[in-house]
Image (tube, grey):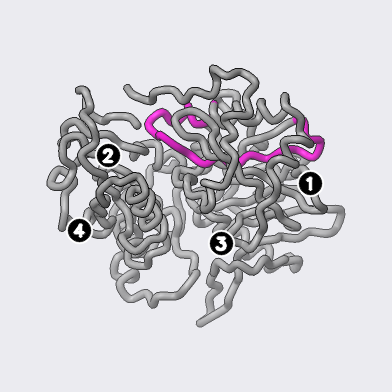
Amino acid sequence: MSPSANSAVAAPSGFVVVGHPDDRRVALFGEALARLGLPPARVIPYVDLLAGRVALPEVVQPGAVVRIESPGKDGATEQALLAAGAEVADQDPEGGYDRITRHELAWLPAERGRILPSRQWYLGLCAELRLVEQQLERCPRHQVMNSPADVAAVFDKRQCHERLSRHGIPVPRSPGPVRSYDGLLARMEQMRCPRVFVKPAHGSSASGVVAYEVGGHRRQATTTVEMVRRDGEVRLYNSRRIRVYREPGEMATLIDMLCRQRVHVEQWLPKAGIDEQTFDLRVLVIAGRARHAVVRMSRGPMTNLHLLNARGNLDAVVARMGVAAWDAARRTCEQATRLFPGSLYAGIDVLITAGYRSHAILEVNAFGDLLPGADQLRDVSRDSRNPDDRMPPVVDR
C-alpha cells in the first residue's frame, strides 16, 4: 500500500471503503477482514460523496487504510456518475461522443442491461476520483490500496494500452482511434489485420465488446450486445448470451453506435487451446508479485467467467508452456503493474499465443482482485526457480 501523505504511516486503525454498501465485492472484503480478526470497514457510498453528504476527512482517521471499490452495477451509482459526467467538459480532442443531459437522465426509465453513454460515465467517474484525491489530501497519515489516478488510467483502455506499449510490454497491435464502421474497415485493411476486437474504451466485464472478423466476402461480429429497435431508435443492451451478427447493415449500426461511446480497437490474436477450447489467464498481482492465476476457458472469443465460461487447469497450462515461457508471462504481468505504482494490486488479463511460446497483455483491471475460491489456488509466486523472487517487495513511498 502506498501512503498519500509525506509522513510515517502508523499501524492501521481501520479500513474505509469507497463503494456501494450492497455490492458483492464490498461484502466479500468485509468477510475477509472478519476472518483476519479485523473490525468492519466503514463504507462510503459513491452517491453520498458526490452529493456532499459525507466527506472523507470526517471518517479517515490517522493510520486508516482506504480502498476504492468498483462502482458495481448499482443503478443509483450509475445515474450519479452519469449526472456528474454531464457537467464535465470532454478534453478528448476527437470529442463528439454521446451525451445525455441531467434533465434527460432524470426522466430516463430504468432498463436492465441498457448501455448508456459510457464516455460520460467515465467523465463522472474521473470527477468522483478527483474528489476522493482532493479529500484524501486533507487526511493525515493514511494509506490507499489503489490510487485514484491509477483507477482512472486503467479505466481508459486507450490510455492503458498506450502506456503498456510505450514501456515495452507486449500488447496486441492497435490501429489507433476509430470513429465509424467504415473507418474500422479502412484501418483493418491498412494493418492487413482481418480480425480485431472493438472494445468500449471505458467498459468492463466484456460489456459492449465486439469480436469482428473479415474472411473474403464473409464478415461477422460476435458480441454480448443485443440491439433492440424501439420507438424509432436502436438501443443497445448487454447480455450473457453471445450473438453473432452477419448482416452488413446490422454490423454497421452496431459498430457506429459503439464508436459514439469511444472505443479501443486491437488486433484479435489467436489464443492457445487446451481440452478443445481456447483460453486466457487472469493473473492477480499483489505488491509487485504474481500471486494467483485463473485459466478462463471458452469456445468463443470472450473468456469472461460471468459469461458462463469455465475455469481450466493451471497446472496443465504451465506444463504445456514450459518453465521459461510461464516465467516470462508471469514477469510481464508484474512489469505491467509497476506502471501503476499507486496500486497495491491489479488483475492482469494475459493471452498465451497458439504456439505457447509468447504472450500479450490484453487488459489491466483496477478491480481485478476478486477471485472466488482463491484460497484453493496455488500461489504462483512460488513457481519461480529463484527463491529471492518469491519475496513481495515493500510498496511504500
State the residue position of label 1.
273
Query: Vertically, is 198 above or below 93?
Result: below
Disc 4 and disc 2: Cα gap in Å?
Answer: 23 Å
Q: Are marks 2 and 3 in contact (CB under 8 Å)?
A: no
- Can residue 145 be seen in the rendering of this structure? yes
Q: Which mark is residue 51?
A: 4
Disc 1 and disc 2: Cα gap in Å?
Answer: 41 Å
Q: Is residue 337 magenta?
A: yes
Q: Measuring 72% from the left and 24% from the top, which residue is drawn there?
A: 324
Say how many tags the image has: 4
User: The magenta stretch spans which residues?
Assistant: 335-357
Q: First in sequence, mark 4 or 3: give its number.
A: 4
Q: Measuring 69% from the left and 33% from the top, which residue is drawn there?
A: 359
Disc 4 and disc 1: Cα gap in Å?
Answer: 49 Å
- Can residue 187 be seen in the rendering of this structure? no
Of tags 4 and 3, the one toward the viewer is 4
Q: Secondary structure at mark 2?
A: strand
State the residue position of label 3.
257
Q: Is residue 100 magenta?
A: no
Of tags 2 and 3, the one toward the viewer is 2
